[in-house]
Image: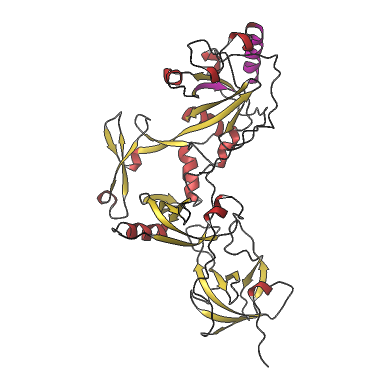
Amino acid sequence: MATEYNFIHEITPLRENMTIKVRIIRLWKPPNYNNPSEDGSIEMVFLDEKGGKILAFSNLLHEGQLRVITNFGVGESTGNYKPTQHPYKINFFFTTLVHACDNLAIPRYGFNFMSFDDILSKQLDDRCLIDIIGQVVAVGPLEINERNGKPCKKIMMELNDDKARKLKCTLWDIFAEEASNFLSDNHSSPIILIIQFAKIKEWKVEHGWYYLACKKCNKKVSKEREDVSANNGQGKMTIFTCKKCDQSLPPENVIPRFKVRIRVVDESGSASFVMFDREVMNIVKKSAYDLKDSLTKMQDDDDSYPEELNTMVGRKLLFNVEISDYNIKENWRVYTVTKMSDNESLIQSYLSTFTTNHDLTSDSTSIDNIGKKTPNTMEKDSISCMGDNDQLSNISPISSSKKRSLEVNSNDLDAELSATKKNVKVKIEKNGN
């Protein structure tokens, strides 16, 4: 009796005794969930003659093999990132049968390339891994960090498609090292990169959320050069320059510091502020180093947006901002926060004071119209992270009868920041690059 074969798209828990003919196109060992320093189960992807793909778990097979498989288990495919869109996965039993079959017309990789347009339009399910192809047009240095107690390497690059659409890409560990070694040679012809099972990540920050600072003076540093000899042959090491200290610095003498751009709003309008290390740490209760390190350990892009910064959204705050000569001369409408407080009694005290003594509509100059050296008497009472949603329809504005100023007593604003008040809802803005 001839064997009846099934295709991958027919696999379901409702059917038993199925037999499939497949090629193992990818195989990997993810970290153990309970101990990331150890390998976990062996995972792989099967491909059949009709292009169907499904995730499988087994320690019996090798990448590239063609096999006939019978009497396997079928379970639900879960997880944040899935290598196929199939709703189920294959599990091997002690009774599962595997036979070699070398005459199957199944391609080695079975690529299914996604267009840059589809990726950038955010229409794809970012839980499913994808295949991409593009020309390498820009490459960053090979960076060495630490994740889960182990050194990890990464390299960032930019790809172009046939329509000159651009896409940022990050390779990790062995893939980063292989790419760095290949790209270090001079190539006269265009370099085409193919990635199978890539993870989609949205870049949510338009202006960044940190800068690299000198540990000694806290001033911003700049990249000076890539030094191969300084890292014991383990890849290139980035050397930085601190202009204030007039020194070249290795990575261990450089640390991330917060520089977060925010939007603030009240009934009179909105404005952009920038908050630095002390003010942001008072709210999120973590350092920029901690957040950047967490992103790296999760194998996320450490330049992506830390979700912890969302704790700033919806806060009702009293700000003291600096309006510098640069703001006035260059019409630069981003203002530096020097002090802030969410102490409700302090806020109400100033609201009451300036309701009595100031009329915002007649006696003040708004930030948007700054250009003359006249007193500014506008205060913003809520903040949001930068992004693409300017409607801010969830804001509950304070009554227009409450007029106030940012010319506040500095000693009052030195009071400890309270982390319990959340009186205004603000939509987070999510600008993608």
Task: Give above or below for 118 relative to 319.
Answer: below
Task: Give above or below for 300 relative to 28.
Answer: above
For the record, the magenta segment spans: 337-356
Task: Give above or below for 35 relative to 384.
Answer: below
Q: Say which of 288 and 94 sits in front.
A: 288
Q: Residue furthest top?
A: 357
For the image shown, how many numbered marks are present on the structure?
0
Residue 53 included in the magenta stretch of the image = no
The residue at 54%/43% (across/down) is 432
Q: Residue furthest bottom?
A: 1
The residue at 42%/17% (across/down) is 325
Work out which quarter of the rendered image holds the N terminus and state it: bottom right
Q: Is any part of residue 153 visible from this angle?
A: no
Q: For the stretch drawn in magenta, what is the main secondary structure?
A: helix
Q: Say which of 379 and 348 sits in front.
A: 379
Where residue 98 appears, x then y in whole percent? 57, 82
The residue at 48%/36% (across/down) is 207
Where residue 121 appears, x then y in whole percent? 58, 50
Q: Say which of 161 and 119 sits in front.
A: 161
Q: Is residue 247 left or right of residue 154?
A: left
Here the colouring is secondary structure
Q: Residue furthest left?
A: 229
Q: Residue furthest front?
A: 163
Where residue 282 appears, x then y in whole percent? 53, 29
Task: Give above or below for 203 relative to 12.
Answer: above
Where residue 191 appears, x then y in whole percent? 37, 59
Q: Is any part of residue 145 visible from this angle?
A: yes
Q: Is residue 246 left or right of residue 159?
A: left
Residue 344 included in the magenta stretch of the image = yes
